[in-house]
Amino acid sequence: QRAGNSPNPGELPEHTVRVFSETFGGDEPGIGAFAPGRVNLIGEHTDYNGGFVLPMALPLFTAVVGTPRDDGRISIVTVAEGADEPHRIEFAAPREEAHLKPGSPKWANYVKGVIQHYRAGPIPGFNAVITTTSLEVAMYTFLQQLCPDDGDLTQKALACQKAEHTFPGVPCGIMDQFISVLGKDGHALLIDCRSLEVTPLPLADPGLAVLITNSNVRHELTGSEYPDRRRQCEEAAKVLGKETLRDASLEDLDEKKENLSEVCYRRAQHVITEIERTASAAQALKSGNYRGFGKLMVDSHNSLRDDYDVSCPELDDLVAIALEVPGVYGSRMTGGGFGGCTVTLLETSAVERTKQLIQEKFRGSPTFYITKPSAGAGVLQLRTEN
């Protein structure tokens, strides 16, 4: 996989540009934008507790290409695999007296939310094609070319978060939007989810690699797992007399142990120790102490497994197998849990052996992605044949 600073404009949007031309009468798009994906190295389920997260942007990009139109209508096509039907929608651009509302198809709610909460206006009509369903930041960056805002990056990320809360109805933390907007080539970002302060940390050592392993397993959930955990954290903070668990220490927790259910105690123990681990991991990365960073990753995984109950046997196996390989510093589940991916920090020279051992010992069909930190969202330089 290519891991450059930005998408190759002749490569990434080619299919998207072709679909645009086929859909909109042979025209070529005049503007485009991209935004990266992300992986969280450490700091899981801490964002909604006012804590720290430590993600990096990935050179896996969402692209939006398009062109303005003068009739006040917006027409958007998605080429994302798995997007619900229909794959093309059309609606009037929002005005003060006519706000957009969520509805179906589901993928369009992410688009509509960003358009409705965009921080400048009025937005003109436009035609556009988008490449994936994970696209708030890419869509916002596209709108900045149509109708420039004040360029405030923090407010841009917050507007994208608000869009996700209000239209798709996902009560996400700020991490995804912040790393996609503010990602820095060759750096992870320590994000303080309370103050919104962002600290870039170098992660460009050529002898170091980040391996993402997708278990390709997703356990069926009832839908209450995340709201339950959020509620349990809020309940623990209330018993401890704190606004959030960010303000609590393990001493505070132990003092009030008798007033907490066993489950709430464990949830709070994970969050309090994970916030500490993430701050320590940032210091380790700053000083090039990869072994120390790796140990904190493993401690994080064990805490997510034992105290937060969001791991699963497949993720535990992937972590255990990776840790058998010399040159692996640390490994942990990443993301919400119950399946999905692990992230492993290791020497570049150990990557192939780690992949080989996982393929030999893991009961499943994992896929791998070796990566370096990418830059954040930007403008796509489209090549036209003019």
Image (cartoon, grey):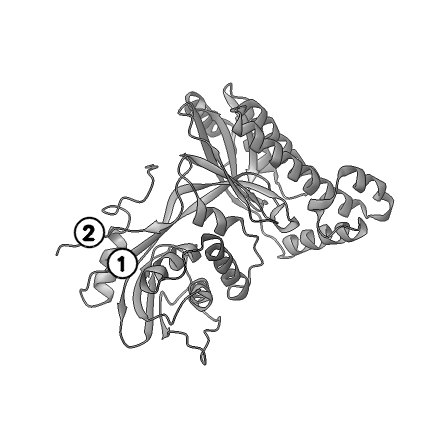
Q: Confirm or deny contact between disc 2 and disc 1 (CB under 8 A).
A: no
Query: Does 10 sit left or right of 280 as displayed?
Result: left
Which three-letter amino acid code belongs to the residue tagged 1? Ile
Furthest toward the left, the residue is 386
Q: Three-letter amino acid code at disc 2?
A: Arg
Mark earlier in primary sequence (2, 1): 1
- Mark seen at residue 8: none
- Residue at (24% x, 65% y) in the render: 23
Rendered residue at 54%/23% (across/down): 289
Spot occupied by residue 287 in the image (x, y as percentages of width and height) = 53, 25
User: Element under label 1?
Assistant: strand
Mark 2: which secondary structure?
Answer: loop
Q: Quote the CA–CA distance across marks 2 and 1.
A: 10 Å
Q: In this rendering, does residue 248 appear at all?
A: yes
Comparing 16 with 83, the one in front is 16
Circle on res. 383: 2
**Residue 366: % across, % down:** 46, 37
The furthest residue to the right: 258
Residue at which label 1 appears? 31
Q: Which quadrant would residue 85 be assigned to in this image?
A: bottom left
Percent coordinates x, y for residue 355 in the rendering:
44, 28
In this orientation, which residue lies closer to the viewer: 276 or 350?
Answer: 276
Q: Is 134 above or below relative to 357?
A: below
**Farthest residue toward the top?**
326
Tell me if I can see residue 62 in this picture: no
Instruction: For the C terminus, give its image quadrant.
Output: bottom left
Up the image or down, 344 lies above or below 16; here it is above
Coordinates of residue 288 in the picture (x, y in percent): 51, 24
Q: Which of the 4 image quarters holds residue 22?
A: bottom left
Q: Quadrant of the N terminus?
A: top left
Q: Residue at x 55, y 25 (%)?
A: 323
Q: Residues within 10 Å of mark 2 (few under 14, many from 20)?
A: some
